[in-house]
Image (cartoon, grey):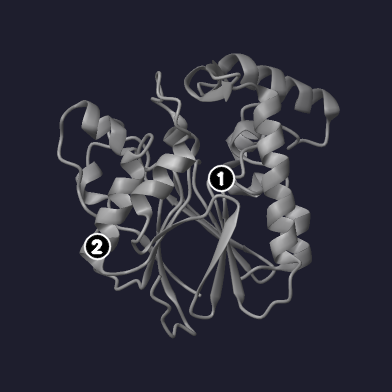
Amino acid sequence: MNQRDMKNMKIGLISDIHNEFIRYQRGEVPNISNEKGFEVLVLAGDIDCQGYGAEYAVRQSELLGIPVIYILGNHEYYDQYDDKEPVVDKVRKIIHGTQVTLLNNATVDIGEVRFIGSTLWSDYQLFDSPVRNKMARDYASVRLNDFNHIKRLEQDELTNINVEDVVGWHQEARAFITGELNKEPAKKKVVVTHHAPMADCLSEKLRDEILAACYASNLDGLINQYSPAAWLYGHVHGNNSFKVNQTLIQRHARGYPNVNEKYKDNYKPVLIHI
């Protein structure tokens, strides 16, 4: 990846553009607009299913001539059908030799910024109440589309994932992010996840619902302890930005194109100065 002298980096952030819905309708997928002059593009998940999101990331990197940070969302794992090749392996093949970096519990340094990336998932422990947390876990196992559309390979057979899988992935992600934040702060640190890191990322209405635990986890302590420069995320459709002490918490998640009729005008990332 081209390492630039970016002491004050301009980052373009966008997520949840769900290009799969445009593909299903045989529509033309728009390219990212860079009218604001960002120097790094962050795609924080739910770009498209399987390898299509990676192909899109490579195309945007080539068209814009800049590095792209790519995080897998939960929807990247959809549409696997009978294909036993893991999505992560597909993506790595597609982006090999390009300026696109997949951050799947991984880091990359660009200029003076270290990006720490993970899907994050959820542990369904968002609430103070053990009863509500159990309700959230039970609700997710029955109602969440992920458990019908995401597969894992077990004894050479594809099977639906379960709540235990997701909780395990979240625990791995949390341990990885914690370890990276705990390292010497030689560079500015920007965490990028698909799922939200705290309840405050949700609307007041949603954060009181059981469904909230499917969108966010309680990583408030990590943010307060380590104060990364920014925590960028997606998954929760819509835009939001606030600060926790010195940490910028921000999303720019466009949402389903069939819901937002002006989707072609909404391939414009938000500009973030780090």
Residue that carries the numbered disc 2 in the rendered image: 62
At which x and y percent is residue 247? 63, 67
Q: How far apart are the alpha carbons under marks 1 and 2?
A: 24 Å
* Residue hosting label 1: 119
- Pointer 2: residues within 10 angstroms few (<14), some, or many (20+)? some
Residue shown at 45%/82% (left/top)? 6
In the displayed structure image, the side of residue 256 where residue 219 appears, left or right: right
Q: In the structure shown, which secondary structural element does the residue marked by tag 1 occupy? A: loop
| Residue 215 in the image, given as x and y percentages of width and height | 59, 37
Position of 252 relative to 27 (above/below): below
Residue 253 seen in the current view: no
For the point 60% across and 18% down, which residue is it? 155
In which quadrant of the rendered view does residue 245 lie?
Answer: bottom right
Is residue 102 at all visible to an observer of this figure? yes
Residue contact at pointers 1 and 2, CB within 8 angstroms: no
Q: Vertical placement of 11 versus 198: above or below?
A: below
